[in-house]
Each structure stands twice: as C-alpha cells, then as structure tokens.
C-alpha cells in the first residue's frame, strides 16, 4: 500500500478519534462553567480522564478479540448514548447522571483510542513515523475542531441540550463510517501471546528512564489544560470568541505545528526533535502566564498566548508520538501503546485534579507559570530514553 493511501486512511480514523476529545476538553468545560460550576469542581472532574490512564488494563482485549474496527464502532455507539444522557442532565448540579455519562464517555473514548492507535501502528512501516504522526495529529485536531470549536457556535441558536443531541448523531455517523477503513489483520499467533511479549518488552535495559521520560515530557500541557477554557470564560470571552480563536485558530496553529514537527522528525530524527520541540512547548506556557498577569494588555495578549501554545504543542506532539510509535512492536501495539499513553496520562491527570483548587488560591498567572516548570525533569531522562529508539536515521522514501 502506498504512503499516500495510508495517510488518507490515517486521516479518516484520527478525525474520528479527535471528535470525542474535543467534546471533553473544549465543549464540556465551557458548558459547565457557563452554568456556574466552580473551578474546584471542574478540576475534580478531571479525575474521569483516568480512563485514559487505566485503558492499558483492558487493552489486551483489543488485541485478543474481534478486530480493531469493531472496537472503534462499539466505542462510538457508547459515546452517542452518553451524549444523549448529558443532554438530559442538569449541568448546574453535577449529579450522578451527569458524572456517570461523562465518565462512561471517557472510558469509551479511551477504548477507541486503544483500537485506533493499534490500527495505525499496524499500518505504518519503519521510517514512516514522521509523516504518519504529522497526519495523525492534523486529522485529530480537525476532529477536535469539529466538536470543540464547531459545536460551540450551536448553543446560541439551538440551545445546549440540542447541541449535545447533534453531537450524539455525529458520533453515530462516525460509528458506521469507520467500517469503510480496510482490515489490518493481527496474526493469530500474536493474539495468543500478549503478556509474555509485554514482559520481554518491559524488561529491556534502561526501561525506568524511558517510563519516567514518558511520564513527564508533556505534563506541562496536561497541567495547564483544565484551566484554559475557564480562564477564557472568566476573562469575559463569548462562546463564539472561544470557538474561533482558542479552538478553531488554535487547531489551525496546532496543525501547522504538527506539519512542521513531522517534517522536522523526518529530517532530524526523533531524538533531536524531542529536545528542541519539547523546550519550545514548555516555554510557551509562560505566554499564558504573562497574559493572565497583565489583563491591561487586552484580548490580543490572550490570543497570542493561545496561538503560540497551540503551535508549539503541535511541534512537541509530533516528536513525542513518533517516539511512542517507534518503541512499540506492531503485533502487540494495542497493549504497549496503551501502556505508554497511560504512563503519559497518569501524571497529567493527577496534577489536573487539584488545578482548580490551586488556581482559586494562587490565581491563573501563578498557576500557568508553575506548569512551565513541572516538565523540566523529563529532559534529564531523555538521553537514556533515546536508547530505545534504535535506528534514528531521517526518513527517506523507499527505504
């Protein structure tokens, strides 16, 4: 199969993967803050994202049973039901129904991620990680834009409940559209042996620095994320402004960053890209801190901070995802990639839970500045983490 054909397939499935994350990251925080949910409660709600941390526990099922397109379809159907439930729940109370729907939505989204990530790793050949991850991140952001940005324009005209019903209908459409993707079979012998290869993979030398690096590399972005949308709401921005600048133009900036990052990975290799792109992404958090500490600078300062953060996040994401893909084995990708992303997620989710409580006490500016510092230790583990990459020559078509 040609690289162009593979990239077209990846574009389709990662639009589908990004769609529920846009609802969780962009639509729900604005919805709940508009209904006077406190920052502390919004921070605590981040606990449901432990679903992405725990997904490695059930990821062997994706390798062992069925085929990956079936898992994606089932997850999208479940998310459609959850969105219908959110449409009927009282947002001001954060009651059992709303919590349950959001939590189950996250579990289904995490399961979908396991299946889609494994599907993409099975499709990629060695050396194609840079172009693959540029396309993955771009398509993912388009899916995120469709839900987190596009749907934010809807409540003014149709109200919040109908907006969530529309999101449920789109989820149903995606559930059936994924059946058009080609089957990527997993060898039967690989299905029969999941845990033993995982143990061998984990027992490779210098494994601890690898997992510490994965744990910490993107923690700055994850720590800041839950407070970004509330910050925009509290600064007086309308839904449409948030959707246009922070989400829509932000997605465009991230896509530009991932394209540049994918080219950089292909030309420089994964190891060198992790250094430079990671430092740029970490420093960008200070832009939000500056905008929060100088409200007199007006809306333009917030706009600039948002676009810079989005672009550098795309840069670092392209390098980081290329690293995760490279160190996974194709035949056991569902379990291995899920475990790596769980490690990545646990630190970000844990630090996000008290984010609202901390922000209410020290303010947005100080909190955003602190998030620029917490990921610095990751770079101490990067030299040894690079040892798992193996051949890190730049990509050359036909090799």
Image: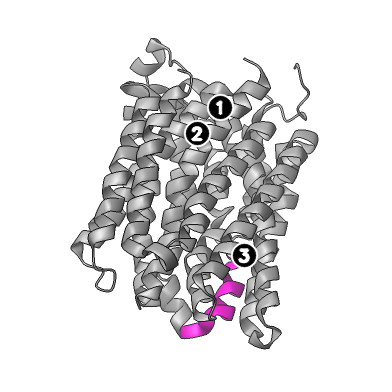
Do residues under tags 2 and 3 come within 8 Å of each other at their CB atoms? no
Q: Is residue 364 magenta?
A: yes
Query: Mark 2 = which residue?
Result: 13
Do residues under tags 3 and 1 come within 8 Å of each other at their CB atoms? no
Q: How would you classify the magenta stretch by its main secondary structure? A: helix
Q: Which residues are magenta?
A: 361-374
Do residues under tags 2 and 1 come within 8 Å of each other at their CB atoms? yes
Q: Which mark is residue 245?
A: 3
Picture residue at 39% right of the left edge, 37% below the top: 173
Mark 1, secondary structure of its residue: helix
Question: In the displayed image of the protein, which residue is found farthest to the left?
Answer: 96
Query: Mark 1 = which residue?
Result: 9
- In-image side of 342 versus 7 (left or right): left
Res. 324 visible in picture:
yes
Closer to the camera, 27 or 165?
Answer: 165
Q: In the rendered structure, which disc, 3 or 1, sits on the residue that comes first in sequence? A: 1
């Amino acid at each position: 199969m040609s690289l162009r054909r593979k990239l077209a397939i990846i574009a389709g499935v990662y639009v589908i993967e990004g769609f529920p994350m846009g609802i969780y990251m962009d639509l729900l925080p604005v919805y709940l803050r508009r209904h006077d949910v406190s920052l502390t409660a919004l921070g605590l709600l981040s606990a449901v994202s432990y679903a992405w941390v725990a997904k490695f526990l059930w990821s062997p099922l994706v390798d062992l049973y069925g085929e990956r397109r079936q898992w994606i379809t089932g997850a999208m159907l479940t998310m459609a039901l959850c969105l219908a439930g959110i449409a009927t729940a009282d947002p001001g109370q954060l009651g059992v129904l709303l919590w349950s729907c959001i939590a189950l939505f996250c579990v289904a989204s995490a399961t979908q991620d396991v299946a889609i990530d494994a599907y993409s790793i099975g499709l990629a050949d060695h050396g194609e990680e840079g172009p693959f991850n540029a396309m993955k991140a771009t398509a993912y952001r388009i899916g995120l834009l469709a839900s987190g940005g596009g749907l934010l324009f809807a409540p003014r005209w149709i109200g919040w409940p109908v907006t969530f019903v529309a999101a449920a209908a789109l989820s149903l459409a995606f559930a059936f559209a994924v059946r058009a993707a080609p089957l990527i079979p997993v060898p039967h012998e690989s299905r029969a042996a999941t845990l033993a290869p995982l143990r061998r993979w984990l027992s490779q030398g210098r494994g601890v620095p690898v997992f510490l690096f994965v744990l910490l590399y993107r923690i700055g972005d994850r720590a800041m994320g839950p407070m970004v949308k509330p910050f925009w709401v509290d600064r007086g921005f309308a839904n449409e402004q948030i959707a246009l600048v922070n989400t829509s133009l932000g997605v465009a900036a991230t896509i530009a960053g991932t394209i540049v990052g994918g080219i950089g990975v292909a030309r420089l290799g994964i190891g060198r890209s992790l250094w430079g792109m990671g430092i740029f992404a970490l420093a960008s958090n200070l832009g939000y801190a500056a905008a929060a500490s100088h409200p007199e600078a007006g809306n333009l300062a917030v706009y600039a901070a948002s676009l810079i953060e989005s672009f550098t996040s795309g840069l670092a994401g392209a390098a980081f995802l290329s690293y995760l893909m490279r160190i996974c084995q194709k035949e056991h990708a569902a379990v291995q990639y899920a475990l790596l992303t769980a490690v990545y997620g646990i630190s970000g989710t844990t630090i996000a839970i008290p984010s609202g409580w901390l922000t209410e006490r020290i303010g947005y500016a100080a909190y955003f500045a602190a998030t620029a510092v917490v990921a610095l230790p990751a770079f101490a583990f990067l030299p040894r983490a690079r040892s798992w990459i193996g051949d890190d020559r730049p990509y050359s078509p036909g090799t």
